[in-house]
Image: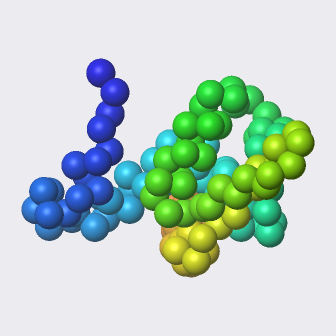
Amino acid sequence: MAYNRKPTLECETNPSADCAVEAAMAVLSGKWKLKIYKMLRSNDALRFHEIKTEIGAISDKTLTAQLKEMEEDNLLTRTVYPEVPPRVEYNLTPLGKKLNNVLLALDQWGRAYVYEMRGGILPELD
C-alpha cells in the first residue's frame, strides 16, 4: 500500500499540534528531493536530462514522480516549450526559493549533530 501524503498536508483534517512541521517534512520527504532541490537552487533552469545525469542512480520513472510531487507542492515549475523536439525546463518557484533558508539551517544542525555524534571529530561533508 502506497503512502498517502495528502492527509498530512491538510492541517484542517490533521489537527495535530505539529501539523505544520509534519506537512513540511512530507513535502521534503523522498529519497531524491533534496538532491533535486540543491541542483535547482544552484541553477536558473534545468532540463530533465541534466537533472538525471547529475544525480546518476535514479530511474526516469522515479525522477518523474519526484519532480511531479515537487511541482504539485509548488516548489518548482515545469515549463514546456513548443519546439520539436519538446524542451522542458524546471525552475524553483518563489515558495521553493524560500525553502533555502530552512535547508541551510538543517545543514548547520546536521553538521553539529554529526560532529557531536563523532565525539568532536569534524564531519567531512561538502
- Residue 50: x percent and y percent? 84, 46
Q: Is residue 3 left or right of residue 29?
A: left
The image quadrant that residue 21 belongs to is bottom left
Q: Which residue is at 80% across, 69% downward? A: 44
The image quadrant that residue 92 belongs to is bottom right
Relative to 55, residue 18 above or below: below
- Residue 41: x percent and y percent? 71, 67
Q: Which residue is at 29% across, 48% downward? A: 6
Q: Which residue is at 13% across, 57% downward? A: 13
The image quadrant that residue 81 belongs to is bottom right
Colour style of the rendered protein structure:
rainbow
**Is 26 or 71 nearer to us in this picture?**
71
Relative to 55, residue 88 above or below: below
Image quarter of the N terminus? top left
- The answer to whether residue 101 is visible is yes
**Is 101 or 86 nearer to us in this picture?**
86
Q: Is residue 27 left or right of residue 65?
A: left
- Residue 19: x percent and y percent? 22, 63
Q: Is residue 67 left or right of residue 17?
A: right
Q: Is residue 89 left or right of residue 24?
A: right
Image quarter of the C terminus? bottom right
Relative to 42, residue 49 above or below: above
Q: Which residue is at 55% across, 45% downward? A: 68
- Residue 109: x percent and y percent? 52, 68
